[in-house]
Amino acid sequence: MKYSIIKISRLFLCGLVLIASACSDFLDEEDPSNLTPDNFYTIPDHAEAAIASVYDDIRFYGDGAGIFSSNWQLLEAPTGTSTTETAQNSDLNNLYSLTWDGNTGHIKNWWRGLYKVIAQANLVLDKVPGITPMDEDQKTRILGEAKFLRAWAYFYAVRLWGDVPLVLTPQSASSENFFPARSPLETVYEQIVNDLKDAEAAGLPWTDESGRVSQSAAKAMLSKVYLTMAGYPLNKGSEYYQLAASKSKEIIDNPGPIALFDTYMEVHDERLGNQQEHIFMLQYNDLVQGNPMGNMFPNFKPVTYRGPSGTGSTVPTFSFYESYEEGDLRTVDQQGYFYTTYYENGSGEPFDLGAPYIFKHFNVVANGIAGVPGTAKDNLNVPMIRFAEVLLIYAEASNEVNGPTQAAVDALERVRDRAGLETPSVGEFTQDSFRELILKERWHELAYEGITWFDMVRLRMVYNEQNDDFDDFVGHVNQNSNQALQEKHLLFPIPIQEMLNNPNLEIQNPGYQQQ
């Protein structure tokens, strides 16, 4: 089922890019070589193809960012939980050393990638309502998916750059708002919430094993947005912590098929994509685009069917690996989220890697495991929202409003139980001690999933693995680079080229060079 989105996406490209004769049955057009947004959106299949294109565009997350680097590393390198074994990409080196600027390639790629998703979603939202005849439930569902994906993109944008242009309609060179100015971040958040509420009410299935947006994904994303709004920089506090707690509890109380996997191996089993713990994922199929997390492979060690290969451009710092509690199953070699040994060429004799590496995104089906050669086809999806995060959102948000409660402790305990860790009873916690344990759990459970950086920004705190405590964001020294975070690092700079292209992007974020 996970391949349906990809098949539709390829069909959409056939319709809009080349229009070969093989597409003639799909496009009932007099002149199919001259498609425009006005004459394309005429039948329900066009709507399906258009929303598939938006799904395809969100995969920019895993696209390349120069030699030995990928876009997703923007969210990992600055956290201090990872380092590099290659150091051959200057832009990536700047992210690790906290010296990025408005010309850093990853930052430019994220801006362009997010606004491409927004532009495609805006086309769907503008054009699909006019398609007739079309089943109204189908139309409502597609519009709900487009609202979710637009909110997904803006949620990243507002956290990366603060005030950003809020564009809600298709644009052309003649559009009045062709050079949009930045909108206040609170206005952007209001739009994100409105889009997610519309998606939640769009009649989507509770879960969707094809990888499309589901109602539970909309609820989970809303809880995540509310939690962020409760913290910095909006500081909306108790009201929004309560909203986050209530929305996440809707999933916890009526989960249907949603649950934690029993083992950590199941978290990165390609055969379990879009199921159980995985509420929303980026879809990958080797026929179109394989899993993009290979930069986590160790540098030139034969852990896959390819033999000695890999870039080692994102590997865990030893200090972070060591910060997991004693007995934590997430650190068990090849069973948790790390591995310290593997098999020659993926399936041969075992050998010692000499250091811990990230196993969370390692696909044993594609790369091989003891005695079983890899398929060389990496169809592993990338998790965006897992049920483990929903449980931790509820525990944190509930604690901020009510202090430790049995329900909040139960939510945290479910995550820790799987890790083989003991959790104190509710009466042993204060609000502060419970908060600290929840946040440590977020750092250790959600590591290397593009989440930790945003926790650092919304909390204005960073986990210090050296003393098992939390530092203020400003002044915290990343162990991977021995560099301290500064106030300016709370936001990334607007890409210089975007400022040159758009005269209404007049003011750079504080601390960065204007041009």
Image (tube, rainbow, N blue to C red):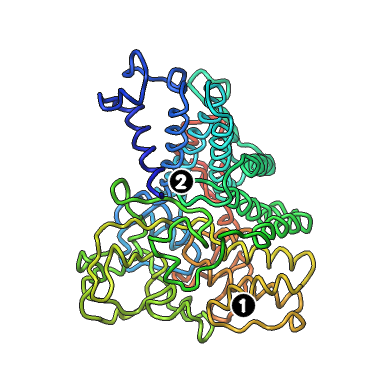
Looking at the image, residue 230 lies above or below residue 467? above
Asked if residue 84 shows in the view, the reply is yes
| Residue nearest the viewer, comparing 322 with 47 | 47
**Label 2 Cα neighbours within 10 Å, binned few <14 / some 14-19 / many ≥20:** many
Q: Residue furthest top?
A: 30
| Residue 136 x %, y % | 58, 29
Q: Secondary structure at mark 1?
A: strand
Point 24% across, 71% down: residue: 372
| Residue nearest the viewer, comparing 410 with 166 | 410
| Residue nearest the viewer, comparing 45 with 357 | 45
Looking at the image, residue 99 lies above or below residue 24? below
| Residue 68 x %, y % | 31, 57
Q: How many marks?
A: 2
Please identify the quarter of the rendering in which residue 316 is found: bottom left
Point 39% across, 70% down: residue: 358
| Residue 371 x %, y % | 23, 75
Q: Amino acid at mark 2?
A: Trp
Q: Residue furthest bottom?
A: 326
Q: Secondary structure at mark 2?
A: helix
Point 47% across, 36% down: residue: 51
Q: Which mark is residue 110?
A: 2
The residue where tag 1 is placed is 469
| Residue 183 x %, y % | 64, 37
Q: Amino acid at mark 1?
A: Asp
Query: Could you tell which of marks 2 and 1 lies nearer the N-terminus?
Result: 2
Point 41% across, 65% down: residue: 268
Relative to residue 470, is residue 267 drawn left or right?
A: left
